[in-house]
Image: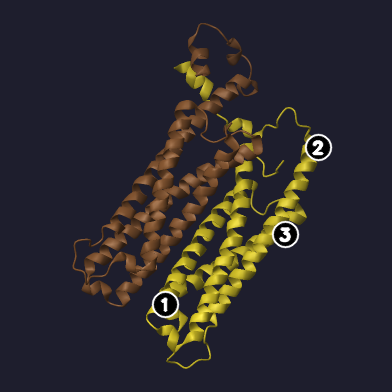
Chain colours: A yellow, B brown
Amino acid sequence: MVRTTGVESPSPRPRIHQTHPHDTPLFQSTVAQTNLRRFNYWILVFRLTAFCVSLSAAVFMLTINAADSPESPRWYHFGAFRFVFAANSIVAVYSLLEIGASVWEIYSGCTVFPEFSQVWFDFGHDQVFAYMLLSAGSAGTELARQLRVVATCTANNAFCIQSDVAVALGFAGFLSLLISSLLSGFRLVCFVIKGSRFLH
Amino acid sequence: MVRTTGVESPSPRPRIHQTHPHDTPLFQSTVAQTNLRRFNYWILVFRLTAFCVSLSAAVFMLTINAADSPESPRWYHFGAFRFVFAANSIVAVYSLLEIGASVWEIYSGCTVFPEFSQVWFDFGHDQVFAYMLLSAGSAGTELARQLRVVATCTANNAFCIQSDVAVALGFAGFLSLLISSLLSGFRLVCFVIKGSRFLH
């Protein structure tokens, strides 16, 4: 019993900071740096896309029939459209911050927060915000369908079309964030397994 | 298996306790096997939960007001509720198959498909189905809200309460599937990095 715990207790944790004995540190670090740089460029591309698309979705929703008569429906009268607007705004702000962090990492070679916090922060937020955007998009889609059923759209078609576009842009933002989330998830597991965000 | 004989038999491999444990291939593989087994148990637990919860959600939706008058609303008249039912049924079937695959892997020590296909299959389906369940849940929630607005629920409150419960069970299924998806994602990245689904 004692011996078993003796065998198991060292646990995989100390290994995290060891390099594999067959790897040449210099070679590994240059290849790893090139890979990491390429990886960061890809993340940056998807974050830029997520930023542009979710900002457009939020602005689109915000400006729906701003110049129309006071009797026409407003987007903020509908809970699901408020959710779409809020989710897209949050993702736009988050993506902007992450773009800054990516650019910083590409140019300086180090992360804004300590490496451990950074990889967990990125993956956690990517996941939560991706699910939030998808949830907002689905609720918005269902509301748009219901508005067609109760004939709001025959009275004011421009309202429905613009809200459809905003919801669709939200889905595009979700796709970009989903890919960012997969990439940052990959980086997180690299970090958990090898103790470094550098890839091989 | 190897570890048990190694520890209990008189002295087949004294090396285990002399060299640094992390440098011994035998030790690594036994620890890897123990970790993998524990990991598989956790996946099995979450798959079982996902199966029970999403099956309940589908059955709950299916049996809403089956004995009511023909004039009362039916769940299949609403697109979003059909989506909730379909998504939960698909996840229940998928979880059942995955439970079978997990039990097989725990008892035989090898995967049903080749390892490469299995890890990609698991993670891909977990992700897609988790997003599908969340999307169905959000659409169902929004529809339930709208039904309250158009006063369907004052006329037939049991219908609304039962559909709320089905949607809530769908969200619980999503949470289980989300955790399975994180676990299988971790295993996939292990496989991509190290060419083996063994964790350490």
Q: Which residue is disc 3 drawn over?
A: A103
Indicate the position of residue A160 as horizontal and vertical percent values: 48, 81
Say which of marks 1 and 3 sits in front.
1
- Residue at 49% over, 84% down: A159
What is the secondary structure assignment of the residue under circle 2?
Answer: helix
Secondary structure state at the residue bearing disc 1: loop
In the displayed structure image, the side of residue B123 where residue A29 appears, left or right: right
Q: Nearer the viewer, residue B124 or A27?
A: B124
Name the amino acid type tagged 2. Phe
Q: Is residue A147 visible?
A: yes
What label does residue A78 carry, if any? 1
Residue lying at the far top in this picture: please name it: B10
Kindly identify the residue that appears in the image at 45 percent across and 35 percent down.
B102
Q: Position of residue B76 (x, y in %)?
A: 33, 65
- Give the residue type at disc 1: Phe
**The image quarter in which residue B104 lies:** top left
**Total marks in image:** 3
Image point 46% across, 46% down: which residue?
Answer: B179
Chain holding disc 2: A
Q: CA distance from mark 2 to mark 1?
A: 58 Å
Of callouts 1 and 3, the N-terminal one: 1
The disc, 2 or 3, on the residue closer to the chain's N-terminal end is: 2
Give a yes or no on whether discs 2 and 1 share a subunit: yes
Pointer 2: what residue?
A27
Mark 2 Cα shell of 10 Å, populated few (<14), some (14-19), many (≥20): few
Q: CA distance from mark 2 to mark 3?
A: 25 Å
The verdict on a common chain for dots 2 and 3 is: yes
- Tell me where residue B194 appears, x and y as whole percent: 65, 35
Q: Amino acid at mark 3?
A: Val
